[in-house]
Image (spheres, rainbow, N blue to C red):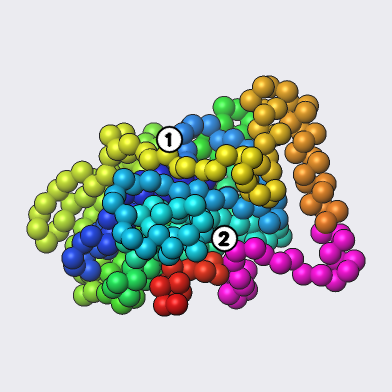
Amino acid sequence: MLADFLAHPDEFVNVTDHQTPRDRFIQVVKWYLSAFHAGRKSAVPKKPYNPILGETFQCLYDIGSSSSSNDAIAKDGPVSWASDNHVTFIAEQTSHHPPIASFYAECPAKHIQIDGCLWTKSKFLGLSVAVHMIGDAILTLLDHDERYVITFPSAYGRSILGVPWFEMGGKVTIDCEKTGYTANIEFLTKPFYNGKKHQIIGTLFGPDKKEFCKIDGEWNGVMNAKYSDTKISEVFFDTKKTAVIKKIVRPIAEQSEYESRRLWKDVTYYLKSKQMNKATASKSFLEQRQREEAKDRADKTLKWQTKHFTEAGELKWTYENKLIKRLKQ
């Protein structure tokens, strides 16, 4: 799901093409709001595979732009088989209790990167389940020294004893301390009576703290923007008319043991072939192995060692070999 947040990688890298802080900020908001629909192809919530400690996922997105000559920068990054014009992504399950996923993406040719760490906290609400997303991500534009701190909405599974359905809710923010631009966005949950599903409202503020743009619409449909200073109204983003760019993942045979698609290949095969008992047995095998490994580490007083991310505070990990670090070498 985290990799699907880059399903419109062209919107991600286009942030760097804008000339003013205001236009770059608007593009960050547009990319952010464009991202949620791709990971939610079904309106029905489905139980995901439980992440395994140390599990990783790598992929890239080909945005079709021409490459510069320095592909070595990309090959030292999160995806060694990428070129510098690709958008590359890596994630790692860096903690099991609580379940923390750390992730990182970059495009070397555009000097843009994003580094984040998220974990979930579930809560039963009668006939619903709330999954709160705790943590944030920092998008950095290296050529402008701009850092955008981004938070994420909660997810809700509704009518869990009937016909279940999914929605998102809660307030999120996007802030750039250097330029002073900020956005307050709310994912609205459906009212009990009447009302529409999947609505968002957002307000963008400039360095003077004055509102200059309002956004509304459906996060999985059409979103509109109205600019108070120019009086211009426009379609901000239309998820129905904008093609998703598919992620490119190495064949399973070339993946390491703990890469997601290889790790879960038996479970996936049995689910697709509707052999539910075998799928359950394969899933239980992986989970039991994880418990035994945890017990063995505890007996030997050993600490789990992450592969690609390093600790950066309490319940926080950061990608070890960021683009900004490699460009300085």
The quarter of the displayed image where residue 230 is located = bottom left
Residue situated in front as seen by the camera: 180 or 124: 180
Would you name the residue on which mark 2 appears?
102
Q: Could you tell me if residue 184 is visible in this image? A: no
The quarter of the displayed image where residue 222 is located = top left
Percent position of residue 304, x then y: 74, 66
Residue situated in front as seen by the camera: 69 or 219: 69
Residue situated in front as seen by the camera: 238 or 271: 271
Percent position of residue 318, x then y: 55, 68
Which span is picked out in magenta?
294-317
Percent position of residue 120, x then y: 60, 55
Q: CA distance from mark 1 to mark 2?
A: 38 Å
Q: Up-down: is 36 above or below 280?
A: below
Judge left or right: residue 41 versus residue 94: left
Label 2 environment density (alpha carbons within 10 Å; few <14, some 14–19, many ≥20): many
Q: Amino acid at mark 1?
A: Tyr
Q: Does the stretch in magenta take in 283?
A: no
Q: Could you tell me if residue 160 is visible in this image? A: yes
